[in-house]
Amino acid sequence: MLYIHYTNTMTNIGYPISEIVGEVTRECVMTRTRRIARVITNLYDSYLRPHGINAPQFSLLVMVAKMGSASRAEIGRANRQERSTLTRNLALLLEQGWVEEVVSAGGRSRPIIISETGKALLEQAVPSWRTAQEKARQLLGQESIGTLLRMENNLAQTESSA
């Protein structure tokens, strides 16, 4: 176990705090991707808000529609979400009637499907989504969009082969 004793200027491994902060500020992939994600999410939220849905909920609703009928675990894996986050977002979609749980014949599984209300919401919200999509493309630039799509595809391939 590495023990770092904080002082105002040095850690016990010999690096000044200012150097550590500078390195993280300049190079941290996590910090940068989270900041970009917040900006883009806020952009989509602003266009989807009039429809009573936010960007993560919209994304989840589309995922459920794409999957047709899926368990909570399958949706979580497909959307790369932790169980608690998925449960919280699904609860709102269920409460609003945008998705439904279907009780199977044996009663053991309860797949989630998009409801007619959810389909109507997607139809109503897609023009706003398209506007947000265009604004995001302008903000990020076509080259960055291509890079993002390739990165996501590479991550998906890496995860499926692991």
Image (spheres, rainbow, N blue to C red):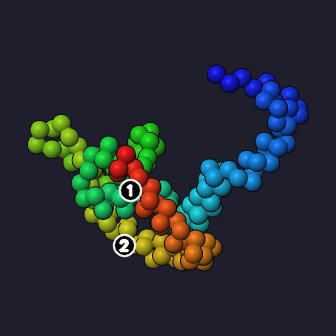
Amino acid type, residue under disc 2 in the picture = Glu
Q: On the rendered image, what quadrant is the N terminus found in?
A: top right
Residue in the picture at 85% in, 42% down = 18
Relative to 70, say whether 136 is above or below: below
Residue in the picture at 24% in, 47% down = 111
How busy is the neighbourhood of tag 2: few (under 14 within 10 Å), some, or many (20 plus)? Answer: few
The percent coordinates of residue 144 (x first, y second) are: 58, 71
Q: Which mark is residue 157?
A: 1
Query: Mark 2 or 1 closer to N-term?
Result: 2
The percent coordinates of residue 129 (x first, y second) are: 48, 71
Q: Secondary structure at mark 1?
A: helix
Q: Secondary structure at mark 2?
A: helix
How many numbered marks, from 0 up?
2
Residue in the picture at 49% in, 62% down = 151
Q: Is residue 66 visible?
A: yes
Amino acid type, residue under disc 1 in the picture = Gln
The percent coordinates of residue 85 (x first, y second) are: 46, 43
* Residue identified by numbered label 2: 123
Q: Relative to the observer, which residue lies in front, 132 or 30?
A: 30
- Which image quadrant for residue 135? bottom right
Viewer-nearest of labels 2 and 1?
1
Residue in the picture at 86% in, 28% down = 7
Q: Is residue 124 left or right of residue 71?
A: right
Q: Relative to the observer, which residue lies in front, 160 or 33?
A: 160
Q: Residue furthest left?
A: 105
